[in-house]
Each structure stands twice: as C-alpha cells, then as structure tokens.
C-alpha cells in the first residue's frame, strides 16, 4: 500500500493514492495522488509556497517507491478528503 509506505510527508495533512484509467475505455491505469497541504501547520507560508513545498515533499517520498507504485499524477486540494462513516 503506497499510503502506508510513504506515511504523511512534511507539509502534507492527508493523502489518498488510487488507480485512475489511463484514458476512457482503457483497462490500463495510472497511479494518482490527491493530497491536502497542511495549511494549519504553517500559517506563516503563503498558499502557493506551501503547495510547492507539499508537492516537492510528495515527489521526494514517491521517488523512494518502486517505479510501478509511484504516482504519475499529483493533485493538491484545499479541502479535506471525503470520508465514509468509518472515517476511511
């Protein structure tokens, strides 16, 4: 599990890694990551600066993974990731 392997990199509050279709109708998938920067933990930084630091921290963490497990898409969002009733 990629999320367990990388933990929570610096400047990142939470993340989710998932398979995403390469293109419509394709059975091939690309590994993608949706992450929330830790805006609360660094109020001294601008939004843009924190997003850049979070993106760099994610890339650094993912570079340690086997190539097939590395997300090729990283998207940062300002809103908390959705949760189910069990908080997963």
Image (spheres, helix red, strand yellow):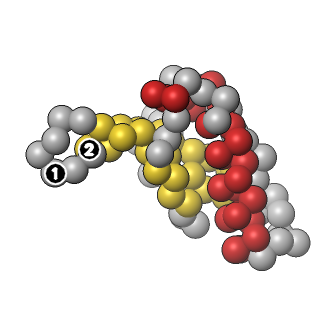
Closer to the camera in the image, 83 or 71: 71
The reply to whether residue 39 is in sight is: no
Q: Secondary structure at mark 2?
A: strand
Residue count near mark 1 (Cα–Cα under 10 Å), binned few <14, some 14–19, many ≥20: few
Q: Does residue 45 appear to the left or right of 27 in the view shown?
A: right
The reply to whether residue 51 is in sight is: yes
Q: Does residue 65 appear to the left or right of 31 in the view shown?
A: right
Q: Residue at x 77, y 76 (%)?
A: 46
Q: Residue at x 36, y 40 (%)?
A: 30
- Residue 62 is tagged as none
Give the image quarter of residue 47.
bottom right
Q: Secondary structure at mark 1?
A: loop
User: Is residue 14 shown above or below 79?
Assistant: above
Q: Which residue is mark 2?
A: 21
In the rendered image, the residue lying farthest to the front is 67
Give the image quarter of residue 84.
top left
In percent of width and height, residue 78 lies at: 58, 66
In percent of width and height, residue 80 lies at: 55, 57
Residue count near mark 2 (Cα–Cα under 10 Å), binned few <14, some 14–19, many ≥20: few
In the rendered image, the residue lying farthest to the right is 44
Residues tagged 1 and 2 counted as in contact (Cβ below 8 A): yes
User: Is residue 71 shown above or below 36?
Assistant: above
Q: CA distance from mark 1 to mark 2?
A: 7 Å
In percent of width and height, residue 11 lies at: 76, 53
In percent of width and height, residue 25 lies at: 11, 46
Q: Residue at x 76, y 70 (%)?
A: 49
Closer to the camera in the image, 84 or 11: 11
Q: Which residue is mark 1?
A: 24
């Amino acid at each position: 599990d990629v999320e367990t392997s990388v933990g929570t990199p610096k400047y990142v509050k939470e993340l989710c890694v998932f398979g995403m279709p390469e293109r419509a109708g394709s059975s091939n998938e690309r590994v993608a990551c949706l992450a929330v920067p830790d805006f609360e933990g660094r109020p001294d930084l601008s939004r843009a600066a924190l997003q850049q630091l979070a993106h760099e921290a994610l890339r650094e963490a993912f570079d340690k993974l086997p190539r097939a497990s590395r997300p090729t898409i990283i998207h940062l969002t300002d809103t908390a990731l959705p949760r189910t009733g069990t908080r997963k």
